[in-house]
Image (spheres, rainbow, N blue to C red):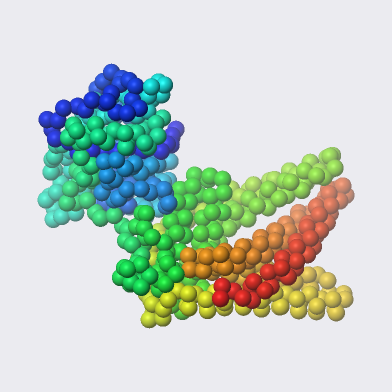
Amino acid sequence: MTAEGLEREKKYDVDAGAELPDLAAIPGVGRVGEPHGAELEAVYFDTEDLVLASRRITLRRRSGGADAGWHVKLPPERGAESGSATGPGLEEGPEARREIHAPLGQADVVPGKLLAHLHAYLRGSDPVPVARLSTRRTTLALYGDDGVHLADFADDTVDARLLQGADQKPAGESAGREQQWREWELELVHGQPEVFKAAAAVLSAAGARPAAHESKLRRALGAAAPKAQVKEISGTAEADGTAEAEGGVRQPGGRKPGKKWPASAVVTAYLDGQISEILANDPRVRLEEPDAVHAMRSATRRVRSALAVYRKLYGGGAVGRLRDELKWLGRILGTPRDAEVMLDRLRTHAGKLPPGEAADDVKRRIERELVTRLEAGYRKTQEVLLTDRYFRLLDDLEDFRDHPPVRPSAAAPARKAARKLVGKSAKRLRRAHKAALRVKDDASEKPGMELKDATAQETALHQVRKDAKRLRHAAETVDPVFGKRAAKLAKAAHKQQKILGDHHDSVMARIFLGKLAGGPDLPEPVVAAYGSLLKREQKSAAKAEAKYRKAHRKSRKLVRRGVG
């Protein structure tokens, strides 16, 4: 069984002979609990090249103390950061890190539910022991005047020893190195971050200094600790007083692209956000959490759209290869997602059938077929997310983001380059709409070919939906540059995409129901029940088409204008 929570703690370096601070003197602290001692033994795991540490992720198995077990600590999500990579100041609040616990289990077998959160970073490598830390801890609980347990203060004396897996230098140079140090920790329990500011003067007077390392592991690793895999996306000197750069990854708390930044920086920032979404949803898909497949699939589609819109900014075949692989991944994720959407849709519609044996039979058949499809889709997805092909895709995405193969045109100001490229996506949508109108007009002039014409019209509207989605994603990329104009365009395109998405779902539902209704030897009441569902879907499709045409008329001028 696993448990999750947010850890908000701050570490302080302190001399070995320092006296404990007068914790009762901290403003807001009404009482200090009795000291409790514990002996903690922790083994930290990572790959041999310390991939997890480079991403500010820790994996450990710790015995002793109240929270003995396996722990994974993940860095804060984008937008939740504060402080710096080396730790905040004495009065600043620390980062809230997500912490996941699992029981002790076996000493060398990482629990599967914890590994689910790490596969996207391990990428086929096995975690091995890299450091062993023995900590003598004395903990004192801090209570407010109202009796609320605000925080825990820990006085730690740490003995650390690097293991063979931590060696990034010539063989044996780092492994076996031992260190000892003392540090203090202040961790919130039910208190607010203001506790850290309130405690600053008292701790400083006792000799506390902001920790030079964000974790015990990084201090133990010393020179072997890898640098965090982040770098800032720079804009132009004209925009921010910074030097121009070709791309990169925004640091935690870094600036968003500005209006005068180069086009490549704007695209890179957008790709960075979507890659983060893919990595964040990877474990959620593995654990089959609600809406995870949809979120991960949407992120892959956004990356594909951005690469398609801005492909001329980049050289070589990297864009084409990435788009092909993202299409493959999206197709894999689409199988369980489409089954999930159809199951929810038809459960609702079948629930409105008149009660009786026929309705019950239809519900059972729909449930059986779609649940089987859903489960098979999830199994296939789980298999794919452990393949070298998937891990290579993640590597390639990050490499493209960090080292984009830009052409000279990518250095042009984003306003100029993006206006033109987003305009092309808008023009593409207008052409798709006109093509759909021609198909509809042709159908009205050719009586007797209803089935063929209906299929052609559904295909044309589906293309409109795809192009609306592409325009939406293109407009999203330039939100930092064009602001409200880009947001309005994205919203208009999304509305058309959503309406036509319902239309497409209705088409797919009719195909599915038609196959079930065509089964041999079905009782007449069952066939009638299927017929009722098919009519409902036909009405739903007609309603969606009418809504789309209204949405198109309302957004026609906006789409024609684009962001320019």
Relative to 481, residue 187 above or below: above
Q: Nearer the viewer, residue 338 or 305?
A: 305
Residue 377: where, in percent of width, then height?
A: 57, 53
- Residue positioned 79% across, 60% down in the render: 543
> Is residue 416 among the parts visible in the rendering?
yes
Left or right side of 197 for 435:
right
Query: Total of numbered circles in the picture?
Result: 0
Residue 397: where, in percent of width, then height?
A: 41, 64
Left or right side of 208 for 523:
right
Left or right side of 189 for 359:
right
Q: Quadrant of the C terminus?
A: bottom right
Q: Residue furthest bottom?
A: 408
Left or right side of 245 for 165:
left
- Residue positioned 23% across, 45% down in the render: 213
Q: Nearer the viewer, residue 317 or 426?
A: 426
Relative to 252, residue 360 above or below: above
Q: Nearer the viewer, residue 77 or 405?
A: 77
Relative to 16, residue 245 above or below: below
Relative to 189, residue 561 above or below: below
> Is residue 392 among the parts visible in the rendering?
no
- Residue positioned 32% across, 58% down in the render: 230
Residue 96: where, in percent of width, then height?
A: 38, 42
Q: Quadrant of residue 260?
A: bottom left
- Residue positioned 41% across, 78% down in the render: 412
Q: Quadrant of the N terminus?
A: top left
